[in-house]
C-alpha cells in the first residue's frame, strides 16, 4: 500500500490474481423488459490461469446481460471453473460496460467487438470455493477488467486489492 501526499491515507495497490478466457454463445434475447433490453449469453467453456491455479471454464451458466435505457450495459455472469487439481470454483461476476459514442454506432451496425479503447468494462468477481487451498479467494476484495477479443470471447483479468 502506498500513501498519498495530499491526504496521508493509504492507497491500495492491485495484485494480479487470475485471467479467465471465456467462450460464449450468441446472445439469446429476452426482449424489452421493465429495466431495459435483456439477453442471455450462455457460457460454452474456456480456460483460466492464476496464482498457483489453472484449469478450465466449465460449460453452463451465462451472462444475464441488461442493456439499460441510458446506454450502460450491466453484466451479471454466473459460471464455474475446474482447476487442474479437481477443485471447483463458482464465480458470480457483476459489472458495467460503457461504450463511447463511436462504439455504440458500431454496435448498432452489428459490429462487435470494437476496439478496446472505445469502451470501459469493469467488474467485481466473487468466488465460492471449498475450504482449503483456494479459500483465500473468498476473503479478498477483487476487481476485474473485461475485454472482448472476439464476438464469442470474453477475457476477465482479476486483481486483488492489496
Image (tube, helix red, strand yellow):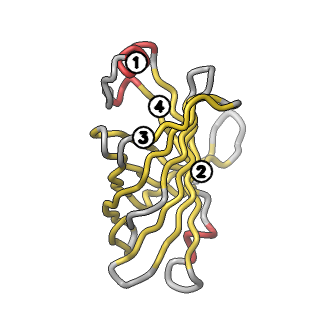
Crowdedness near tag 4: few (<14), some (14–19) or many (≥20) residues, C-alpha within 10 Å = some
Measured in 3D between alpha carbons, the distance from the residue under mark 3 to the one under mark 4, in whole angstroms, is 20 Å
Q: What is the C-alpha distance between the residues marked 4 and 1? A: 17 Å
Compared to 95, does 52 lie above or below?
Answer: below
Mark 3: which secondary structure?
loop
Residue designated by label 1: 108
**Which numbered disc flags the more N-terminal residue, 3 or 2?**
2
Instruction: Decide which of 68, 140 is in the foreground and name it.
Output: 68
Q: Residue at x 56, y 66 (%)?
A: 127
For the residue labelled by badge 4, is the local secondary structure a helix, a strand or a loop? strand
Nearest to viewer (mark 2 / mark 4): 4
Q: Which residue is labeled 4 in the image?
A: 120
Q: Which residue is mark 2?
A: 12
Q: Residues within 10 Å of mark 3 (few under 14, many from 20)?
A: some
In the rendering, at what x and y percent does residue 13 appear? 53, 51
Which is nearer the N-term, disc 3 or disc 1?
3
Image point 36% across, 26% down: which residue?
A: 117
Left or right: 141, with 80 as reference point:
right
Residue labelled with disc 3: 27
For the image, the number of numbered tags is: 4
Amino acid at each position: 500500500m502506498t500513501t498519498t501526499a495530499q491526504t496521508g491515507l493509504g492507497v491500495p495497490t492491485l495484485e494480479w490474481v487470475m485471467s479467465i478466457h471465456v467462450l460464449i454463445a450468441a446472445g439469446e434475447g429476452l426482449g424489452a423488459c421493465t429495466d431495459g433490453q435483456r439477453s442471455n449469453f450462455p457460457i460454452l467453456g474456456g480456460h483460466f490461469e492464476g496464482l498457483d491455479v489453472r484449469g478450465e471454464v466449465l460449460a453452463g451458466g451465462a451472462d444475464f446481460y441488461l442493456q439499460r435505457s441510458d446506454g450502460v450495459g450491466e453484466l451479471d455472469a454466473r459460471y464455474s471453473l475446474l482447476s487442474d487439481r479437481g477443485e471447483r470454483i463458482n464465480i458470480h461476476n457483476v459489472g458495467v460496460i460503457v461504450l463511447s459514442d463511436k462504439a455504440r454506432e458500431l454496435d448498432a451496425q452489428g459490429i462487435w467487438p470494437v476496439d478496446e479503447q472505445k469502451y470501459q468494462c469493469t467488474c467485481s468477481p466473487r468466488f465460492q470455493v471449498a475450504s482449503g487451498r483456494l479459500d483465500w479467494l473468498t476473503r479478498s476484495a477483487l476487481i476485474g477488467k473485461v475485454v472482448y477479443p472476439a464476438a464469442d470471447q470474453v477475457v476477465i483479468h482479476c486483481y486483488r486489492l492489496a
